[in-house]
Image: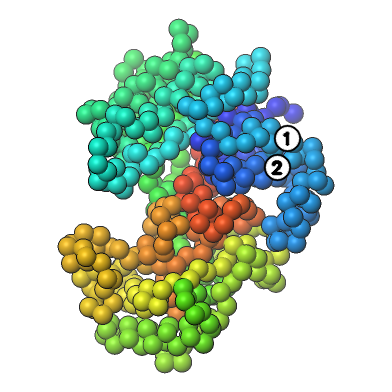
């Protein structure tokens, strides 16, 4: 049996990219083994370490105590005390504490050096430098700051830390991910993406360089055997590959020039689109909470009045009965269930990806509280989506539902409230979901709420047994910042075939 291909995961977040790689291969012979995972944020690091712990068990069989822990039946200490060797290995992988490139370089470089050892077998470097400085929202926020100087924002240049790892250790393959905004970012006056691309191509040594490939487009031409692409060719649209979310990201795959690879080897094969309803429809229906004076009866009256108001506003609305069946539960961190909460109408491989019968229910499916006025707006927005198959803009709102903001009539932020449409993939799940649910309103108007943590995780394609450490806000941030694990798996399958050859 051949040894698994080594993986180093930088800027790992909660481990979405690594999860995809770790999943490839038979249960008794995984194709990849993650040796080092680097993450600086505390809650994400705890999630990352727990997931690393699960990979220490043979044949990918999780122990019963893991399920007891995520269901809230035992403590973390009780779990880890039962498996001290596995927990020690997990902490070794994640360096025992949160660490950051640019700050903890000596620790990180030493860990990578020890993990790779003298073995020159193929290995893979994965990860994406933090995107806040490149995203359109982040750039708009920075532009509003007094005395902000883009050239002095180190986040723009964290890719150089990634580059230094490549230069020092020479991975066979690297995978770098970032937001689309990186294509138009010009912190020094020139497009930074072109600089990054040229730096990555020349990041080898006197023996080899790197050829950069797209996952979604064949090369436009070749220059001395090197593939040429337009910057937009590196955009990967997750919904085209079976992820139930329209997440568009720039992903670069660098192949060391001494490896024999064709562009076709790297390209992902498109899959049928998976709509949001197909991964949420069998989950328990929940009511939202109320920020003040929450009770089932008060919420029910507010929701019913709001739905009646919406029907009056939107003429010829799909029928809303005056006696609509409103949900009563707000859910919980673990909901015991007899029937597995997932439709078998989704593609079989995606079903198996989510499925874990040993869970005995559903994790992190509980609602947060909303202001009364937002419950009324959510009722309207979701009702509008049911009828119009689109999310309303603020100019579609009646005056009495408009938010009390100074710029509400300014033609800015016209899509401040956005419903997720049931018959389409979700819109991009971002970490903004941690602040409020306005962009992530559930399509079922009777629930009058935003997506739960588990619903967001399903849209991001995290397996159902993936447990996120921290409070609700921490969990939303981790999910919003992650790479969809199912997409990562598809990338890893292709790379495993390349490297095994």
Q: As displayed, is residue 309 above or below residue 271?
A: below
Residue 490 pos. (x, y %):
52, 42
Residue 295 pos. (x, y %):
53, 82
Q: Residue at x 56, y 21 (%)?
A: 106
| In the image: residue 122, left or right of residue 416 | right
Q: Secondary structure at mark 1?
A: helix
Q: Does the CB distance between marks 1 and 2 fall below 8 Å?
A: yes
Circle 2 packing at 10 Å, graded few (<14), some (14-19), many (20+), is many
Q: Residue at x 48, y 51 (%)?
A: 477
Residue at the spot of label 2: 53
In front here: 81 or 172?
Answer: 81
| In the image: residue 244, left or right of residue 51 | left
Residue 200 pos. (x, y %):
40, 22
Name the mark on residue 89: 1
| N-term-proximal mark, 1 vs 2 | 2
Quadrant location, the N terminus: top right
Q: Residue at x 44, y 62 (%)?
A: 275
**In which quarter of the view is residue 407 placed?**
bottom left
| In the image: residue 413, left or right of residue 472 | left
Q: As displayed, is residue 277 above or below residue 92?
A: below
Q: Secondary structure at mark 2?
A: helix
Separation of disc 1 and disc 2 at Cα? 7 Å
In front here: 429 or 348?
Answer: 429
Q: Residue 350: tell me if it is visible.
A: no
């Amino acid at each position: 049996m051949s040894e698994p291909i080594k993986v180093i995961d930088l800027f790992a977040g909660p481990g979405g990219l690594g999860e995809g790689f770790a999943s490839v291969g038979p249960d008794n012979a995984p194709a990849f083994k993650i040796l080092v995972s680097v993450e600086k944020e505390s809650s994400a690091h705890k999630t990352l370490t727990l997931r690393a712990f699960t990979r220490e068990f043979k044949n990918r069989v999780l122990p019963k105590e893991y399920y007891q822990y995520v269901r809230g039946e035992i403590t973390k200490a009780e779990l880890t005390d039962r498996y001290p060797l596995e927990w020690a290995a997990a902490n070794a992988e994640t360096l025992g504490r949160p660490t950051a490139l640019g700050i903890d370089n000596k620790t990180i470089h030493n860990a990578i050096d020890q993990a790779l050892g003298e073995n020159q077998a193929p290995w893979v470097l994965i990860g994406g430098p933090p995107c806040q400085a490149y995203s359109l929202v982040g750039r708009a926020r920075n532009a509003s700051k007094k005395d902000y100087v883009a050239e002095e924002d180190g986040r723009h240049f964290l890719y150089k830390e990634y580059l230094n790892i490549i230069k020092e250790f020479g991975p066979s393959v690297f995978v770098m991910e970032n937001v689309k905004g990186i294509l138009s970012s010009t912190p020094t006056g020139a497009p930074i993406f072109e600089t990054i691309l040229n730096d990555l191509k020349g990041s080898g040594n006197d023996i080899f360089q790197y050829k950069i490939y797209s996952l979604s487009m064949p090369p436009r031409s070749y220059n001395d055997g090197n593939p040429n692409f337009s910057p937009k060719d590196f955009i990967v649209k997750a919904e085209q590959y079976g992820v139930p979310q329209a997440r568009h990201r720039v992903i670069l795959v660098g192949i060391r020039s001494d490896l024999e690879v064709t562009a076709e080897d790297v390209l992902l094969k498109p899959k049928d689109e998976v709509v949001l309803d197909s991964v949420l429809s069998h989950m328990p229906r929940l009511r939202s909470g109320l920020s003040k004076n929450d009770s089932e009866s008060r919420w029910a009256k507010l929701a019913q009045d709001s739905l009646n108001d919406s029907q009056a506003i939107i003429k010829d609305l799909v029928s809303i009965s005056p006696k609509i069946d409103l949900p009563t539960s707000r859910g919980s961190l673990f909901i015991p269930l007899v029937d597995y909460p997932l439709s078998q109408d989704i593609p079989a491989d995606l079903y198996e990806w989510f499925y874990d019968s040993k869970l005995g229910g559903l994790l992190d499916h509980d609602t947060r509280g909303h202001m009364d006025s937002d419950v009324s707006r959510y009722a309207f927005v979701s009702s509008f989506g049911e009828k119009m198959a689109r999310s309303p803009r603020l100019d579609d709102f009646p005056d009495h539902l408009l938010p009390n903001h100074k710029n509400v009539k300014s033609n800015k932020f016209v899509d401040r409230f956005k419903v997720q449409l049931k018959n389409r993939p979700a819109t991009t799940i971002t970490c903004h979901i941690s602040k409020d649910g306005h962009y992530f309103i559930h399509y079922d108007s009777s629930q009058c709420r935003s997506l739960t943590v588990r619903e967001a995780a399903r849209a991001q394609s995290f397996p159902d047994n993936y447990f996120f450490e921290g409070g609700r806000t921490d969990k939303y941030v981790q999910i919003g910042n992650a790479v969809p694990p199912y997409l990562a798996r598809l990338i890893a399958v292709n790379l495993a075939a390349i490297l095994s050859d």
